[in-house]
Amino acid sequence: MATVEKMPMLQEGHDRLNADLKRLKAERPTIVDAIEEARAHGDLSENAEYHAAKERQGQIEASISDIEDKLARAQVIDPKDLSGDKVVFGATVTLLDEDDKPVKYQIVGQTEADAKGGRISYNSPLGRALIGRKLEDEVEVTVPSGDRYYVVSKIEFI
């Protein structure tokens, strides 16, 4: 029997997925009405409104299915409950780059990642390189723009 892989995420990400699911489910009746209205126009083979509504219905159903799967596999982790001297999921890590310039990232789930916002996925190249590291560890990461080198200067659970 296949094992179901848990999907770690923060409460914030879990709440966002639930909100998206609720919004998509609320859109279902509108799409059904659009399909019925387009059907009333007659010949379905040349009815662009009908085909667009059916396509949108397929997209909504696929999104709902995907979100429900993620929520079913969700393992909500609160960083405040964590501690230790290693980088783990949920930790906020301050790194020093090659110029000793500090950069700060929180290790989050795939659905919550926002590099510009300082949140990187545990599956990203940098996220994978950081997991398990300790203070003062050197980290080398290969990214599309080349190799980057960092030193772990601070690990927080906030």
Image (cartoon, helix red, strand yellow):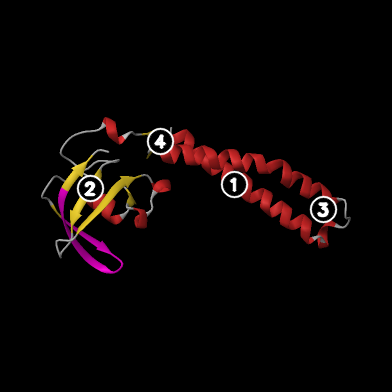
Separation (CA) of disc 4 from disc 2: 19 Å
In the image, what residue type sits under mark 2? Val
Looking at the picture, how far across and down is residue 66, in whole percent?
A: 53, 43
How far apart are labels 3 and 4 at the CA level?
41 Å
Does label 3 or label 1 sit earlier along the sequence? Answer: 3
Q: Which residues are magenta?
A: 139-153
Among numbered discs 1 and 2, the one appearing first in the sequence: 1
Q: Which mark is residue 93?
A: 2
Q: Decide: marks 4, 2 in contact (CB < 8 A)?
A: no
User: Which comes before the other along the chain, label 3 or label 4?
Assistant: 4
Q: Residues within 10 Å of mark 3 (few under 14, many from 20)?
A: many
Task: Look at the numbered disc 2 and give the secondary structure of its residue.
Answer: strand
Residue denoted by label 3: 38
Give the side of residue 154 with respect to residue 20, left or right: left
Rounded to the nearest angstrom, the CA distance separating label 3 from label 2 is 54 Å
Give the Cα distance between marks 4 and 1. Answer: 23 Å
Which residue sits at x=72%, y=57%?
Answer: 52
Q: Residue at x 18, y 61 (%)?
A: 101
Q: Position of residue 136 (x, y in %)?
A: 10, 50
Figure check: 53 above or below 68: below
Residue 11 image label: 4
Q: Which residue is mark 1?
A: 62
Give the main secondary structure of the magenta stretch.
strand
Callout 3–callout 4 Cβ contact below 8 Å: no
**Nearer the observer, 117 or 110:** 117
Query: As drawn, is 93 to the left or to the right of 5?
Result: left
Residue 149 lies in the magenta stretch: yes
**Of callouts 3 and 2, which one flags the residue occurring earlier in the amino acid sequence?**
3
Kind of residue indicated by mark 4: Gln
Q: Secondary structure at mark 1?
A: helix
